[in-house]
Amino acid sequence: MVGIVIVSHSQKIAEGARELALQMAPSAKIASAGGMKNGDIGTDVEKIFAGIKEVKSDEGVVILVDLGSAVMSSEMAIEMISDNENIILVDSPLVEGAIFSAVEASIGSPLAKVVEVLKGAKNYKKF
Amino acid sequence: MATKAEVLNFVRIYVDKMAEHRQELTDLDQAIGDGDHGINMNRGFKAVDEKLLTFADKTIEEILNAVGMTLVSTVGGASGPLYGTAFLRAGASAKGKEALSDQDVILAFDEGVGGIQYRGKAVKGEKTILDSMLPAIDAMKKSIGEGKSMTVALEEAEKAAWAGVEYTKTIIATKGRASYLGERSIGHQDPGATSMAYLFQAAKEAAQKAGK
């Protein structure tokens, strides 16, 4: 199953988005990598690296980010993994993306399909 | 030439500078960013400071790598991956070297700034670290090229870095959090360019102390 890593400056946002997505898709493999080790606001390359390792399989991983340093820190974490060609950082809204990708991954969709759904989440109309 | 002891001393001086200027950098960032640059840099370099004792039997490459890795997991903001990548690249350029010649020092800075450009995808003139770092490296290269000492070269570099910081007051931010402000960012100096100017100040002081 495609793994999902949620990166936010806030530990609570990352954990909350994970919790919400798991409610929709309890079998999804989701790691939250929010905040610093001590819970401070920020992004931590080591934490993201550990998150990727936690959910990584041959089927690939998608990474969702909030903004700013979350992007650069995630890129660095990806570079630290040797076989990283199927670890994809996706430009997607964080909460919607977490839910959509969890559902898509849990029904066994391949990486390309999960990425496509995530990209589509950007244009999702709430009402 | 820079020995391992001098590299360590440079790191130590910069640790102190980030503690000393924590509030100043934070105030600068509060004006145009998310107001955490000083806090983040100080947190990162405090973590570096805690590891300094373990650096005694490490090579220059290992020291610079350890600084980089520490920064990317403790700074928290964009300056973590940016400064972290710079130190990691500088470390890689020092691979296998017991001491750094003047050309090696230039190479380390070149690799460092290359790392920042790669990571941040910014160019000169976007109100970033690069606006003090690029002119500083150019000034340093010019001085060394003219046969001047490392101390003089780094004095020139620091001067160019602060001129770069002044220049950031005149331009609009197009990268990072400050870009949300658009024209309102004019008149404010860039916090990242400022912390980078202090890095050249630290390097200069390390060279002065070593009498190089």
Image (cartoon, grey):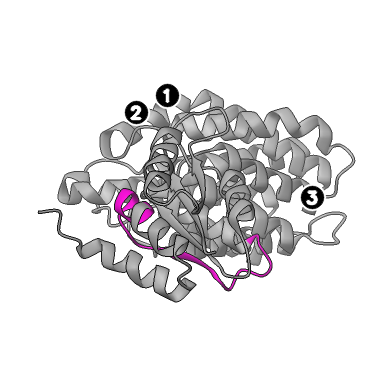
Residue B95 location in percent, x, y? 80, 61
Q: Chain of mark 2?
A: B
Q: Is residue A93 magenta?
A: yes
Q: Earlier in the sequence, mark 2 or mark 3?
A: 2
| Side of B188 relative to B81 (left or right) | left
Residue extent of the magenta highlight: A80-98
Query: In front: B138, or A55?
Result: A55
Q: Residue at x 33, y 36 (%)?
A: B34
**Label pair 2/1, CB-CB below 8 angstroms:** yes
In the figure, A13 relative to B46: above or below?
A: below
Amino acid on which the number 2 mark rests in the picture: Asp
- Assign the C terminus of chain A to one quadrant of the image: bottom left
Residue B33 location in percent, x, y? 31, 40
Q: Which residue is mark 1?
A: B23
Say few, some or many: other residues with alpha carbon within 10 Å of mark 1 (under 14 / 14 to 19 / 20 or more).
Answer: some
Per the rendering, the mark at residue B27 is: 2
Per the rendering, the mark at residue B62 is: 3
The residue at the far left in this view is A127
Amino acid on which the number 1 mark rests in the picture: Gln
Query: What whole-number distance in Å separates the C-alpha atoms at marks 2 and 1?
Result: 6 Å
Q: Chain of mark 1?
A: B
**Label pair 3/1, CB-CB below 8 angstroms:** no
